[in-house]
Amino acid sequence: MSLHQDVLTALEREAPGLAQTDAELIATHLTDRSGYPASGVPAAVVHPTSTAQIQAVCRAVSGAGGSIVVRGAGSGVAGGATAGEDQVVLCLEHLNAILEVSAQDLTARVQPGILNGALNQMLAQQGLWWPPDPASKDISSVGGNIATNAGGLLCAKYGVTRESVLALDVVLADGSLVRMGHNTVKGVTGYDLTALMVGSEGTLGVIAEATLKLRPARTAAEVTLSAVFDDVGAAVRAAQAVVASGLQPAIMELMDEPTIRYVVDYLGVDPTDGGGAYLLIQTDGAGASEEAHALADLLAPGARSVARAATHEQAEGMLAFRRACFPAFERAGSTLVEDIAVPRSKMAQAFARIREIEAKFGVEVPTAAHAGDGNLHPIFIIPFGDQIPQNVWDAASEIFGVALELGGTLTGEHGVGVLKKRWLGDELGGVQMALQSRVRSAFDPERVLNPGKVLD
Amino acid sequence: MSLHQDVLTALEREAPGLAQTDAELIATHLTDRSGYPASGVPAAVVHPTSTAQIQAVCRAVSGAGGSIVVRGAGSGVAGGATAGEDQVVLCLEHLNAILEVSAQDLTARVQPGILNGALNQMLAQQGLWWPPDPASKDISSVGGNIATNAGGLLCAKYGVTRESVLALDVVLADGSLVRMGHNTVKGVTGYDLTALMVGSEGTLGVIAEATLKLRPARTAAEVTLSAVFDDVGAAVRAAQAVVASGLQPAIMELMDEPTIRYVVDYLGVDPTDGGGAYLLIQTDGAGASEEAHALADLLAPGARSVARAATHEQAEGMLAFRRACFPAFERAGSTLVEDIAVPRSKMAQAFARIREIEAKFGVEVPTAAHAGDGNLHPIFIIPFGDQIPQNVWDAASEIFGVALELGGTLTGEHGVGVLKKRWLGDELGGVQMALQSRVRSAFDPERVLNPGKVLD
């Protein structure tokens, strides 16, 4: 019998009726938002509705010698959820319940498929908040946020997703269930396997349930500032002065000149009046207004102009200019989004090197950055329908090299998936790559889960 | 040849002159502050002064079939650094340099032996701060704080040690060196081995260097409140109301009636005027004063009295009353300190059950709690010179059971070491214990590092 048939037979035995093999359905589960092509056609898609069903699927596929791609909402941008030949796509979108919310414990117990935005809408009604805030929050799942240790705009102040996950129910490749972590804020019994699961991109286990650490909703009014600079160097110097000042904005976003150009073209208005860089800052909490005042004073000497939103509409306008980046790029062509992070003191060098790389390879690389934490998104825009040309790959590769040279990392918040796998060894080194591989084997010795992704 | 001699020979070959075998020196490196007895006499103590020397020691001891106990400042309270027969005590106290501080990146690169208090004194001069704040900070090392994921008073607001560590240089048992983690705030390349090292109690690798995540020093004046209650139930209800209110004090500490009695006896004054429970609260940041005002209003209805410190001296007096707990206990006898954590909604039940256990076993269990995060320290006081009697062990064991029954954990911030090892399986379960053991093998298959500690 073929592997394909073995897998389907085992699934039918362990989880009767769960395997979906309809070609049209399978076609919608082949890849994620990276656009990276699937390496083959999977044997089936399954939509479990209980932890027991996840266990049954893992047991079946393991037993048959097959492999599994775990899928949340399919919003990943590193190819981590692309399907392969004869694989089973384990899609968690129907496991989307909120099981429990405790305002006294500041915790929520949820299933992995719930969307971040939907969860936070519900929590807001109780004055609560789960801080992870990726730009994709309305289309990305909590399980996916955990699997990629999703970042976003608020990380410098509120931390990455790891800081907001207390405990997980994890199904291992062989179908066994492990409840890891703690229901408490503190807990040091054994190794922190929960933190290890965060960012593991579906390669260690299947997240069947999560206990999230909540915060009280931010009730004080946020204050929003925007500043326009002559060039990105001046904007970076301003952002660095903010970090060094001890003030802690909730949001600090930077757009360079090519990015501004795309957004102005898209929106049809130019609030920067031909500016060379745009810095968006938001403060929150009890001291929001005073902090914004101090920040405006700090920015003024190096800026062409600094504006403080006087109304909610003005603040929304400032935020909208930043939020329009990706829609503007995506209207212009297919996008390849990089996600390097560098120490904040190296941001100016990173931007300067990106300009050199643009010239060297004859490509344009508009770059938006989470300036509060040194996370840059250099973007390549490829004409619709074209393959990614070699000069783009070469330029992208050289940007990875720059990130490492400056003491940074290949990926700040998107993950390795398949897109960055070939550069991972350059960052981690041989000894660590071997150790990482042994850790993977401790969870999944047969590489049933997401084989070929992240590392081998 | 004996293992003892094999180890010394190998050390002399790989790290000439480093092995110290003086009996008096060895005697000072046998145990930690738990008072737990060493299980044997080590072959040697070594004080490496470089990463290369750590590597040489690991290589030598591994090669000779020996084992290593890593030791920081010896301030642990779970027996994690107690020595064993023929082992090598790898003491990191001389590796205590601050290698680099960057105000622009909000990072510090340090050696593991530097004391938390010493580091923070130096950082304060630059307006910077490393948040981990264990009560032991003046005598505990940064490496030890990392190895135990140390907690303290500020965790509810500022997180545990894990949140303040970006990257580590780790020497594995075979002497190889792994640089793990990122110099950046965000980074998702591969599994988060840095988080896994945090809290691993010397069983996975030797921390040779750490890149710490700093915050700006807290410049706004803190505001300190104290409240006295008729009983611990009323105090817990007040603490729970604080958590549910969305206000976020930096410190919220609770002392029960037996604890107050010990401290009053020790200090010779009773600021509680015969109170049944004491709650200490501190707010900080830009909104400190307004938050304190709101908190005082919240506490007033259930409290016998609420006081707000009008001067620095008054604030210090309030804090001193809490800080006197452990000196007061330690004057009264040898102490066995438990460290359970429970969901904050279960604190009242935890205190009630401790009172029942006191009656059942005829012991007194004064209990101080980090009420902001549900971390309780039930204390047993044993007459100086006595062995720990059976009724104390039985009562301690029953308190662990209560913690688990209430959905909590055996240890919130002290670690498992040897003291809590026998209960670990009750919390983690068999499948997770096996997985934890496989993870340990991925790092240290021969169990060279801290064998017999935490888990087997």
Image (cartoon, coloured by chain):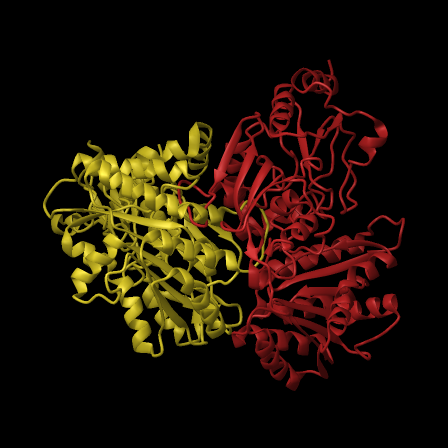
Chain colours: A yellow, B red
Is residue B70 positioned above or below A331 on the image? Answer: above
Residue B370 rendering spot, x and y as whole percentages: 65, 64
- Looking at the picture, tell me which residue is in the foreground, A82 or A343: A343
The residue at the point 55 percent across, 49 percent down is B428
Is residue B152 positioned above or below B60 on the image? Answer: below
- Looking at the picture, tell me which residue is in the foreground, A266 or B380: A266
Q: Is residue B344 left or right of residue A402?
A: right
Q: Would residue A451 be seen by someone viewing this image from the given angle?
A: no
User: Which corner quadrant holds the N terminus of chain A?
Assistant: top left
Residue A97 rendering spot, x and y as whole percentages: 35, 65
Is residue B346 positioned above or below B273 on the image? Answer: above
Residue A119 rendering spot, x and y as whole percentages: 36, 67
Q: Is residue B204 left or right of residue B369?
A: left
Q: Is residue B186 left or right of residue B2?
A: left
Q: Quadrant of residue A427?
A: top left
- Name the residue at the top extreme: B1
Q: Is residue B36 left or right of residue B126?
A: right
Is residue B340 positioned above or below A38 on the image? Answer: below
How many tags in the picture? 0
The residue at the point 18 percent across, 55 percent down is A330
- Name the residue at the bottom extreme: B301
The residue at the point 76 percent across, 76 percent down is B276
Q: Would residue A44 be seen by someone viewing this image from the given angle?
A: yes
Residue B87 rendering spot, x and y as whole percentages: 71, 28
Q: Quadrant of residue B449?
A: top right
- Looking at the picture, tell me which residue is in the foreground, B375 or B14: B14
User: Which corner quadrant holds the C terminus of chain A?
Assistant: top left
